[in-house]
Image: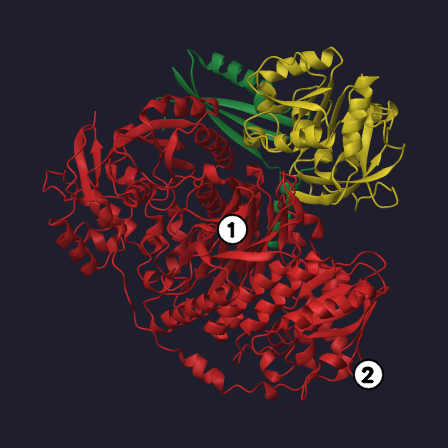
Chain colours: A red, B yellow, C green
């Protein structure tokens, strides 16, 4: 039986067994083992100073993982503190396993997005699979039933064999793992660009629903409570995974394969059901996923949050392999495990539920008041470290310096790009529709079960997914967004656009945007130009979230997305949660009825600057350059309000936001996604072309705060009133037609005339053609 | 009428079937844990979709040895209505309650989406509320739905009207393009000789409410209720 | 006595094997025109504690028939070798 230690919180200068002479996986030399574990010399010195002695090998390993960038947010913590994180609906903000937002009627939504980029770069199938496993357990840990997944993916162009390999591997990994869990994959994005060639991004958002009273936290409170591990047995897999995630990938990325864990979705499914059942009995005081850094981080974090200590007997951990050292057990990242803090009298209840589901379960320790994480192996103390010291790693404020390319970009003149002749616009539109960044993602999402749970009202293939909440009239709306190309050109503006677009995508369905989760994918923060990107992006995101009143409830930072010095586009992915009070009032993207009117809400800039960073400029002219403008956040907010009100009053038949490909593509998509008999449109742009416009920018320019809507002609006055009241420009630009899409620029000048069949063909086959 | 929805470890459409039977069709419904050996009191049994035992080895291969399956045999033997949907169909095949076997989809991918299905036999306990030859839209979501049986078995199934559902195009033609998985003769669902055990790959429980994009599946459950009442 | 048994399960001849076909296609593309056909299968290794090789074989055969292979679509081969310590 373990004793309750005194609560001074000081480490004892005790005889913790020395293991420094042994050799361990991943450690080449024992002389400066901290370096091989990813710690810097000064960090090691700090550990010795704070601990008052040299750590032993096991303790050093524990520090190495918890002080890794992945766990400690060393380079991001200071800036993340500047983000708005509170609001009337936020029940749990950053710092827990996931944010939790109130949706009324005693219900709440837990949601979070997380990256699994590094594992996907070396083993895409398992990397993606275990990425899903981890985020699902985070949601589960809040006491929520996971109800949907969205994936935000980035790859290099499909013309590269490596990109195809990564693309198909990641998609099958999501399919193989996610489908088995019975959690629908309802949306997300896929974007292709050169900088992601060797560094794919795989960000997964999971959301769950819970009743307020079922909320659980990752807290090891109540000395005397029992620490239990449930799920898979522990093996040697994935040791130092989070250290790996905190480095750039070198040429030897392939040889790092042993760091990638293998997922077992069947076990995860059983773990979900078992944990929900255990939590429902009231037996569970605290619960935490064992993700990165395994037992070490889950123990340290739960104890730190509760201000307690833990005493762990690692010989009681169910093990998969023989002869595992304390170091290996503490650092293993074996998947599908949860840490539970259980009332002593309820241990049996938890054990019997685990047995029912065929899961390993074992009490492995006890909560203490010591403030220490103490580890015993068959009675011998092998580690003893203050939890606060483990979880409060160093915080850095690295230098930031504007990259040279930003200055060079300022000299780029969009006017140097000639406006194509009018006769080319048909072709340009079809070419853009076929671009893998715009084309239908059906070849991807048809591999995902997006309907299981029978709540998917609007699934993938739209800007946002709509999930009904059974037993209510409510629906949740989710969107993930980020255009890395725009962020690269102007990180501040780009991050604002990511928030604005995510909010708009949610609002076009009629939902009120409530809160965000974010996944910040950047290069090496120790490089001043990368840190500058990060700083600008975080500040931009914070500003947009403040104006749009969508607080940040959590998320994840992924640095070191570089291969051989080449970083990815800075990619702060925004996952937005919205709420529709009456699902029957939702608005969908495609046109519905011939003769309906089409209007633009908001404005298009139509100038050279709006071409900067556009899909049109890269795809048609081969240029990625310029300074995109910042969004007018006031207009965005008014636009969102307008959309929510218009939907509430049932004024809209369809709504589609302007993003990649601009107004031209938004209109084309409204035709492609339309009901039979309404797959065309007659549009005249005269009313929306600003003075001095260029036609390519009006049609294909981006960074606009605008939405294309269609409505029954008798609703025009009411809609105009809502727009006027909110100060949103309202311009009727045409009407829904049979099956031909025509655009006139001025009086009688037809610039686009294509059939919906041609548009649909280009759009539907865009990805499969790129794979040939 | 009282339906039982069997829950195997890894079932994931159990709650969906339960929801439809209870809240959409308005019948009594209970979950039956796979270790149970008792189906007394039930009028119909649903083997739901999912990944029983992770679909490790082969889809449905491990689930057929669950204790409940002995009771399912006996229940079917006594004439009780049994429907296996998706993974449930795979289990019925592995258990020998229906002839044939499932192979991985010929496109080697998991496929999720809507398909057109023709009701080839509207004279069964599961389809009596459909019109003969009616084309309905239903979702599919599977990796192993490529139905296989030897030629004699297929001929016998066709001859005796036991092919209940077939993948077709909008015009009702069982074309290669309309076949999402390579199933022999575009077979989407079959019934046993006695007419009380149906297996089908499409998910009727996912299309029983208009809000989900289609209601064609509801009549399948209503047909069962009607058959049980008569 | 301990034995290591191996059960190899493949699709019956005449049943189309799309995985095999895909692998063959890739091998052809890589410049191996000699590949006439590819059949994929499962390799299942079982460690048995039984008194004799004959018994091991007969057990493996029974397990293959009952569970490891589906008689409708699959065929199998079993083999046994002596094995002293588990890996």
Please indicate, yes or no, whether residue A158 appears anywhere in the rendered image. no
Identify the disc placed on residue A109.
none
Q: Quadrant of the C terminus of chain B?
A: top right
Instruction: Say which chain tag 2 marks.
Output: A
In front: A289, or A64? A289
Measured in 3D between alpha carbons, the distance from the residue under mark 1 to the one under mark 2, in whole angstroms, is: 46 Å
Q: Check if mark 1 and mark 2 are on a common chain.
A: yes
Q: Quadrant of the N terminus of chain B?
A: top right
Decide: is A385 above or below B204. below
Which residue carries the number 1 mark?
Answer: A205
**SS state under label 1:** strand
**SS state under label 2:** loop
Please indicate, yes or no, whether residue A64 appears anywhere in the rendered image. yes
Image coords of residue A433 (percent x, y): 70, 66
Horizontally, residue A595 falls left or right of residue A624, namely right
Image coords of residue B93 (percent x, y): 69, 24
Dot 2, how many residues are within 10 Å of its Cα: few (below 14), some (14-19), or many (20+)? few
Instruction: Say which chain tag 1 marks.
Output: A
Question: Which residue is depicted at the point 59% across and 77% down?
Answer: A622
Decide: is A403 above or below B104. below
Locate residue A250: give its quadrant: bottom left
Horizontally, residue A600 falls left or right of residue B228, namely left
Horizontally, residue A311 falls left or right of residue A354, namely left
Q: How many badges with numbers are in the image? A: 2
Question: Which residue is depicted at the point 28% across and 43% down?
Answer: A300
Which residue carries the number 2 mark?
Answer: A749
Question: Which residue is depicted at the point 46% across and 37% down?
Answer: A213
Decide: is A198 above or below A355. below
Image coords of residue A454 (percent x, y): 66, 39
Horizontally, residue A344 falls left or right of residue A487, namely left
């Amino acid at each position: 039986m373990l004793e309750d230690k005194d609560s001074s919180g000081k480490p004892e200068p005790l005889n913790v067994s020395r293991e420094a002479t042994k050799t361990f996986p991943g450690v080449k030399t024992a002389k400066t083992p901290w370096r091989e574990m990813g710690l810097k010399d000064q960090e090691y010195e700090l550990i010795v100073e704070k601990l008052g002695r040299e750590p032993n090998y096991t303790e050093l390993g524990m520090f190495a993982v918890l002080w890794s960038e992945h766990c400690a947010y060393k380079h991001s913590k200071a800036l993340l503190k500047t983000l708005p994180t509170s609001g009337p609906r936020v029940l749990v903000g950053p710092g827990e396993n996931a944010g939790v937002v109130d949706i009324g009627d005693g219900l709440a939504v837990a949601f979070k997005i997380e990256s699994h980029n590094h594992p996907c770069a070396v083993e895409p199938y398992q990397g993606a699979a275990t990425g899903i496993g981890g985020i699902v357990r985070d949601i589960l840990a809040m006491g929520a039933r996971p109800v949907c997944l969205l994936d935000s993916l980035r790859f290099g162009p499909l013309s590269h064999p490596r990109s195809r390999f990564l693309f198909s591997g990641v998609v099958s990994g999501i399919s193989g793992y996610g489908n088995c869990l019975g959690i629908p994959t309802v949306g997300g994005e896929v974007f292709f660009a050169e900088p992601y060639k060797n560094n794919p991004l795989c960000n997964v958002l999971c959301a769950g629903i819970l009743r307020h009273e079922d909320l659980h936290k990752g807290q090891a409170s109540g000395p005397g409570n029992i620490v239990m591990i449930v799920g898979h047995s522990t093996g040697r897999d994935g040791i130092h995974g989070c250290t790996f995630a905190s480095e750039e990938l070198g040429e030897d990325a392939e040889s790092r394969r042993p760091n990638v864990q293998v997922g077992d979705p069947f076990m995860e499914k059983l773990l979900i059901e078992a944990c929900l059942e255990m939590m429902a009995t009231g037996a569970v005081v605290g619960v935490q996923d064992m993700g990165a850094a395994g037992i070490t981080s889950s123990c340290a974090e739960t104890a730190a949050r509760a201000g307690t200590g833990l005493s762990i007997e690692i010989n009681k951990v169910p093990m998969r392999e023989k002869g595992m050292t304390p170091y290996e057990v503490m650092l293993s990242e074996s998947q599908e495990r949860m840490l539970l803090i259980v009332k002593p009298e309820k241990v049996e209840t938890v054990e019997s539920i685990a047995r029912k589901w065929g899961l390993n379960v074992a009490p492995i320790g006890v909560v203490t008041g010591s403030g220490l994480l103490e580890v015993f192996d068959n009675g011998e103390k092998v580690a003893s470290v203050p939890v606060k010291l483990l979880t409060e790693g160093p915080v850095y404020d690295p230098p930031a310096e504007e990259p040279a390319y930003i200055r060079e970009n300022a000299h780029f003149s969009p006017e140097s790009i000639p406006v194509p002749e009018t006769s080319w616009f048909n072709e340009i539109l079809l070419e853009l529709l076929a671009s893998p960044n715009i084309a239908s993602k059906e070849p991807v999402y048809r591999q995902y079960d997006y309907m299981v749970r029978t709540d998917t009202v609007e699934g993938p293939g739209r800007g946002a997914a709509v999930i009904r909440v059974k037993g209510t009239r409510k629906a949740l709306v989710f969107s993930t967004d980020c255009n890395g190309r725009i962020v690269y050109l102007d990180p501040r503006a780009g991050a604002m656009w990511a928030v604005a677009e995510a909010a708009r995508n949610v609002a076009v369905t009629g939902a009120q945007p409530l809160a965000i989760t974010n996944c910040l994918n950047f290069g090496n923060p120790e490089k001043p130009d990368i840190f500058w990107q990060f700083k600008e992006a975080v500040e931009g995101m914070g500003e947009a979230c403040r104006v749009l009143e969508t607080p940040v409830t959590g998320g994840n930072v992924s640095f070191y997305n570089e291969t051989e010095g080449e970083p990815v586009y800075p990619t702060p992915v925004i996952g937005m949660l919205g709420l529709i009070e009456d699902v029957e009032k939702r608005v969908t993207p495609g046109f519905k009825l011939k003769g309906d009117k089409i209007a633009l809400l908001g404005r298009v800039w139509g100038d050279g600057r709006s071409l900067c960073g556009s899909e049109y400029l890269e795809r048609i002219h081969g240029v990625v350059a310029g300074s995109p403008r910042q969004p007018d956040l006031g207009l965005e907010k008014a636009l969102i309000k307008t959309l929510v009100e218009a939907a509430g009053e049932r004024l809209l038949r369809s709504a589609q936001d302007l993003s990649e490909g601009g107004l031209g593509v938004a209109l084309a998509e409204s035709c492609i996604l339309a009901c039979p008999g309404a797959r065309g449109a007659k549009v005249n742009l005269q009313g929306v072309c600003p003075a001095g416009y260029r036609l390519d920018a009006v049609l294909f320019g981006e960074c606009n705060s605008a939405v294309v809507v269609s409505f029954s002609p008798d609703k025009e006055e009411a809609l105009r009133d809502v727009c006027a009241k909110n100060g949103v420009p309202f311009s009727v630009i045409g009407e829904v037609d049979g099956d031909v899409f025509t655009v006139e620029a001025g009086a009688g000048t037809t610039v686009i005339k294509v059939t919906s069949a041609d548009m649909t063909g280009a759009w539907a086959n865009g990805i499969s053609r790129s794979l040939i | 009428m009282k339906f039982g929805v069997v829950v195997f470890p890894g079932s994931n459409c159990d709650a969906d079937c339960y929801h439809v039977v209870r809240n959409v069709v308005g019948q009594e419904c209970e979950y039956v844990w796979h270790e149970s050996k008792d189906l007394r009191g039930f009028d119909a049994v649903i083997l739901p979709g999912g990944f029983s035992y992770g679909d490790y080895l082969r889809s449905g291969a491990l689930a057929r040895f669950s204790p409940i399956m002995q009771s399912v045999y006996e229940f079917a033997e006594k004439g009780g209505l049994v429907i296996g949907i998706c993974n449930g169909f795979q289990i019925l095949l592995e258990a020998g309650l229906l002839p044939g076997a499932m192979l991985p989809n010929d496109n080697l991918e998991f496929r999720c989406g809507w398909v057109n299905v023709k009701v080839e036999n509207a004279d069964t306990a599961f389809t009596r509320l459909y019109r003969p030859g009616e084309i309905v839209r239903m979702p599919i979501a599977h990796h192993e739905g490529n139905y296989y049986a030897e030629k004699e078995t297929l001929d016998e199934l066709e001859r005796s009207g036991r092919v209940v559902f077939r993948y077709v195009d909008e015009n009702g033609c069982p074309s290669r393009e309309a076949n999402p998985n390579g199933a022999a003769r575009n077979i989407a669902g079959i019934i046993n000789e006695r007419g009380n055990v149906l297996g089908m790959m499409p998910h009727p429980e996912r299309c029983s409410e208009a809000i989900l994009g289609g209601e064609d599946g509801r009549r399948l459950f209503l047909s069962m209720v009607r058959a049980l009442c008569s | 006595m301990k034995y290591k048994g191996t059960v190899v399960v493949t699709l019956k001849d005449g049943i189309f094997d799309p995985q095999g076909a895909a692998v063959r296609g890739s091998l052809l593309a890589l410049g191996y025109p000699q590949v006439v056909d590819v059949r994929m299968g499962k390799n299942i290794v079982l460690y048995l504690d039984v008194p004799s090789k004959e018994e091991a074989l007969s057990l493996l055969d029974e397990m293959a028939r009952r569970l490891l292979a589906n008689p409708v679509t699959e065929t199998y081969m079993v083999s046994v070798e002596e094995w002293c310590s588990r890996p």
